[in-house]
Amino acid sequence: MTPGSGRFLRDNAFLVAAVSLPLVVVAFFLLSTALPRWMVPPPTHDLLIRATDTYNQTNPRLMVDFDVRGGKAMVTFHALPANGFGLRSKLYLWDHTRMSAREIPVEVPDNLDEGDPRTVVVTALAGREVLAEPKAPDGYQLESRSQRGPGLVGELFGMNRYDSQGVLVNKGRVIPIELPAPFQSAYASPASAVGWLVPESHNGQR
């Protein structure tokens, strides 16, 4: 550093601090955001996700829901009366190796009677054990977060919207969960975790 530069810094200490401090804050924020991506390992378990389209009119007299019983993924069918309307959920499997989700199809049984729900094992997952806990053994948990768009211009012209996005969170690391439309819109019910797929030898609670 030359004598002239040292004098400049002394004479303009306030200006230097005013310029440097925001840069330091931004650098600290970027570092604190990036560290979890480097330090926290990626997920090691697949996740079963329940999603419901509240505006889907397909098969309105049939309500479908999913849960876990005895370590198995179960689907319950409710036949509703003629004037009844039921929300029909879909089941998705989020693959931790591919970081993507795919729908798990279920076959609707025949001869469903009104008021007599039928619960069966999800055939495609019959050989898999499911852990019905909000948090996976590796520490990840599904959360729903709001995201805004399309930005400042949209706010000025009344075009702003709020969308709900599912994310996996673990010690500051955030991994987005992408589901097909319409389950990422503000008009769809938030996706929820059904359970985590674990090896058959897992010793955790069922």
Image (cartoon, rainbow, N blue to C red):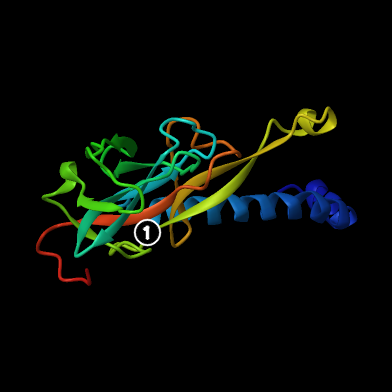
Q: Residue at x 29, y 63 (%)?
A: 132
User: Which residue position holds label 1?
Assistant: 140
* x, y percent for residue 24: 68, 54
The amino acid type, in three-letter code, at marker 1 is Tyr
Name the image quarter holding the C terminus.
bottom left
The answer to which image quadrant residue 180 occupies is: top left
Q: Residue at x 42, y 39 (%)?
A: 61
Would residue 44 be found to the left or right of residue 164 on screen? left
Is 90 in front, or is 28?
Answer: 90
Looking at this rendering, what residue extends furthest in the right direction?
A: 11
* x, y percent for residue 31: 54, 53
The answer to which image quadrant residue 161 occupies is: top right
Q: Residue at x 49, y 31 (%)?
A: 57
* x, y percent for residue 6: 79, 53
- Describe the element under mark 1 as helix, strand or loop: loop
Is 23 in front, or is 103?
Answer: 103
Is 76 in front, or is 17?
Answer: 76
Would residue 100 be found to the left or right of residue 179 on screen? left
The answer to whether any part of residue 45 appears in the image is no
